[in-house]
C-alpha cells in the first residue's frame, strides 16, 4: 500500500484519538485488533501513529517553538495532526526526505483543510526543518 494512503489512515487514527481525548496507543491497538469496515491499517500507518504517540511531547514542543502565534493547542485538529505526522517524519524517520514529508502534508491539507492551512503548514514545516538542522533533501 502506498505511503500516501498510510499517512491518510494514520491521520484518521490520530484525529479520532484527538477528538475523543483518547490515548493514541490504546486506540491504535483497538484499530489493529478490530479494523471495522476498513481494511487493516498498513504497517507504515502503524509506524506513524506509534512514532507520533512516542514523541508527541517533543513534536509539539518543536511545532510550538517554530510557530508564530499559534500553539498546537489552538490549531485545528486536522491541521495539528497533519503537522505531527510530517514533523515525526522530519525529526525521526530518516527514510523519508524532508521535502517528501512536506509535500505529503500539503497534499493532505489541500484536500482536508481550509484554504489558508496549506501555506501555514508549509511555513511551519519549513521552520521545523531549519530548526532540526537537516537540509531539505
Image (cartoon, rainbow, N blue to C red):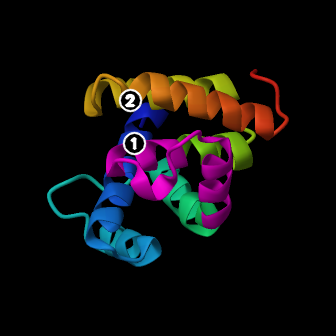
Which image quadrant for residue 31?
A: bottom left
Tag of residue 97: none
Q: Residue at x 59, y 57 (%)?
A: 60
Q: Which SS does the magenta portion mostly show?
A: helix
Image-quadrant location for residue 135: top right
> In the image, residue 110 lies at what x, y percent?
33, 23
User: Relative to 87, is 26 on the left or the right?
Assistant: left
With 89 as the anchor, is 81 left or right in this view? left
Which residue, given by chain and number where applicable, does mark 2 sit on?
117
State the image coordinates of residue 33 (x, y, percent, origin top left).
32, 74
Q: Give the quarter of the figure containing the N terminus.
A: top left
What x and y, as percent, mark residue 130? Answer: 77, 31
Membership of 74 in magenta stretch: yes
Tell me which corner region of the image, top left, top right, bottom left or bottom right, holds residue 87: top right
Residue named by callout 1 = 79
Asked if the residue at tag 1 contacts the one at tag 2, i.e. Cβ–Cβ closer than 8 Å, the answer is yes
Residue furthest right in the image: 133
Q: Residue at x 41, y 53 (%)?
A: 74
Image-based side of 137 in relation to 71, left or right:
right
Figure check: 98 above or below 84: above
Looking at the figure, which quarter contains the C terminus?
top right
Task: Give the residues drawn in magenta, as a range.
Answer: 57-84
The earlier-in-sequence mark between 2 and 1 is 1
Q: Residue furthest front?
A: 69
- Few, some or many residues within 10 Å of mark 2 (<14, 14–19, 20+): some
Query: Going 33% across and 56% down the picture, which residue do you hit?
Result: 15
Q: Nearer the viewer, residue 35 or 68?
A: 68
Q: Is residue 58 magenta?
A: yes
Please give left or right for residue 1 compared with residue 48 in the image: left
Q: Residue at x 39, y 42 (%)?
A: 79
Mark 1, other Cα within 10 Å: few <14 / some 14–19 / many ≥20:
many
Amino acid at each position: 500500500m502506498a505511503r500516501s494512503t498510510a499517512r491518510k489512515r494514520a491521520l484518521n487514527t490520530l484525529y479520532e484519538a484527538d477528538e475523543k481525548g483518547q490515548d493514541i496507543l490504546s486506540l491504535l491497538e483497538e484499530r489493529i485488533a478490530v479494523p471495522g469496515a476498513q481494511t487493516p491499517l498498513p504497517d507504515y500507518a502503524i509506524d506513524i501513529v506509534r512514532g507520533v504517540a512516542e514523541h508527541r511531547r517533543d513534536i509539539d514542543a518543536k511545532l510550538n517553538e517554530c510557530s508564530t502565534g499559534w500553539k498546537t493547542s489552538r490549531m485545528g485538529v486536522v491541521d495539528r495532526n497533519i503537522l505531527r505526522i510530517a514533523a515525526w517524519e522530519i525529526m525521526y524517520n530518516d527514510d523519508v526526505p524532508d521535502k517528501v514529508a512536506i509535500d505529503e502534508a500539503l497534499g493532505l491539507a489541500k484536500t482536508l483543510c481550509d484554504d489558508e492551512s496549506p501555506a501555514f503548514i508549509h511555513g511551519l514545516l519549513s521552520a521545523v526543518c531549519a530548526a532540526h538542522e537537516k537540509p531539505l533533501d
